[in-house]
C-alpha cells in the first residue's frame, strides 16, 4: 500500500495531537473497526467493532453498545482525551473560528444531508480529503440548479 501524504498539523490549522487522532480514526474506519450504527447492530462480532455516530460527540451511556462517538469523539477517545477536548466537552462553537473545513467535517447537519453522513464510506472520504487537502469536499458541481458534492 502506498504511503499517503497527509498535511501537517499547521497546514490543517489543528494541533499535532488532533492530527494524530484524526489519522487514528481514519485508520480504524479503513480497517472496519469503526462502523455505522446500523452495521454495528447487525454484527455478531460487537466486541471488536465500535459504532461511529455523527449525531453525537461521544457517550459511554448507550447501554447496548457502550461507547459511541463521531469523528471528533473517537479522535478524543483514541488520544486518551487530548484531541479536541475543548469541543468534545464544551461543545463550544468558538472552537471553529477560522476552521470552517473542520466545522464542515464535524457538523454535517449544518453543511450536508445528515443521512448521507451516516455512510461510513462518505465519512472516510471526507476525512481523507480533509487530511490530504485541508478540504472536506473535493469539488461541487451544479446540474439543473442542484449542487452535488464529491467526496
Image (cartoon, helix red, strand yellow):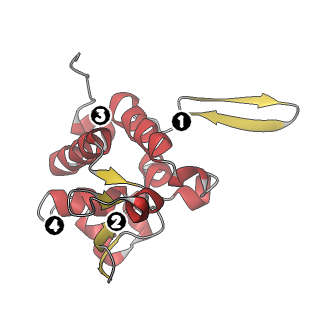
Q: Which of marks 2 and 3 is nearer the N terminus?
A: 3
Instruction: Please name whichever residue, 89 or 35, is drawn nearer the observer in this view of the structure.
Output: 35
Secondary structure under the numbered disc 2 in the rendered image: strand
Q: Which mark is residue 137?
A: 1
Sequence-wise, the earlier of marks 3 and 1 is 3
Query: In this rendering, is residue 60 above or below 119?
Result: below
Q: Are marks 1 and 4 in contact (CB under 8 Å)?
A: no
As drawn, the residue found furthest toward the front would be 44
Residue 150 placed where, x, y %? 59, 31
Residue 23 position by quadrant = top left
Disc nearer the start of the sequence (1/4): 4
Quote the CA–CA distance across marks 3 and 1.
17 Å
Q: Can residue 14 be seen in this view?
A: no
Q: Residues within 10 Å of mark 1 (few under 14, many from 20)?
A: some
Q: Point out the frontmost of discs 3 and 1.
A: 1
Which of the marked residues, 3 or 4, is nearer the chain's N terminus? 3
Residue at (25% x, 46% y) in the render:
28
| Residue pointed to by mark 3 | 11
On the rendered structure, is 20 left or right of 99? left
**Which residue is the site of mark 2?**
69
Residue at mark 4: 81
What distance separates the C-alpha of mark 2 from that of mark 1? 22 Å
In the image, which is nearer the foreground, mark 2 or mark 3?
2
Instruction: Give the Cα distance between marks 2 and 3.
Output: 25 Å
Q: Give residue 54's position: percent from left, percent from top.
A: 45, 61
Q: How far apart are marks 3 and 4 (CA)?
A: 23 Å
- Judge from the rendering whether residue 46 lies leftward or rightward of residue 112; answer left or right: left
Give the farthest residue toward the left. 80
Distance between mark 2 and mark 4 Cα atoms:
13 Å
Amino acid at each position: 500500500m502506498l504511503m499517503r501524504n497527509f498535511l501537517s498539523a499547521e497546514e490543517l490549522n489543528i494541533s499535532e495531537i488532533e492530527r494524530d487522532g484524526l489519522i487514528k480514526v481514519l485508520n480504524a474506519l479503513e480497517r472496519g473497526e469503526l462502523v455505522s450504527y446500523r452495521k454495528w447492530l447487525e454484527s455478531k462480532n460487537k466486541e471488536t467493532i465500535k459504532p461511529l455516530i455523527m449525531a453525537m460527540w461521544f457517550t459511554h451511556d448507550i447501554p447496548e453498545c457502550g461507547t459511541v462517538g463521531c469523528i471528533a469523539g473517537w479522535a478524543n477517545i483514541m488520544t486518551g482525551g487530548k484531541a479536541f477536548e475543548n469541543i468534545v466537552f464544551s461543545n463550544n462553537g468558538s472552537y471553529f473560528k477560522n476552521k470552517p473545513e473542520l466545522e464542515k467535517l464535524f457538523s454535517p447537519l449544518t453543511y450536508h444531508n445528515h443521512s448521507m453522513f451516516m455512510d461510513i464510506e462518505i465519512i472516510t472520504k471526507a476525512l481523507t480529503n480533509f487530511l490530504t487537502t485541508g478540504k472536506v469536499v473535493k469539488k461541487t458541481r451544479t446540474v439543473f440548479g442542484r449542487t452535488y458534492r464529491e467526496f
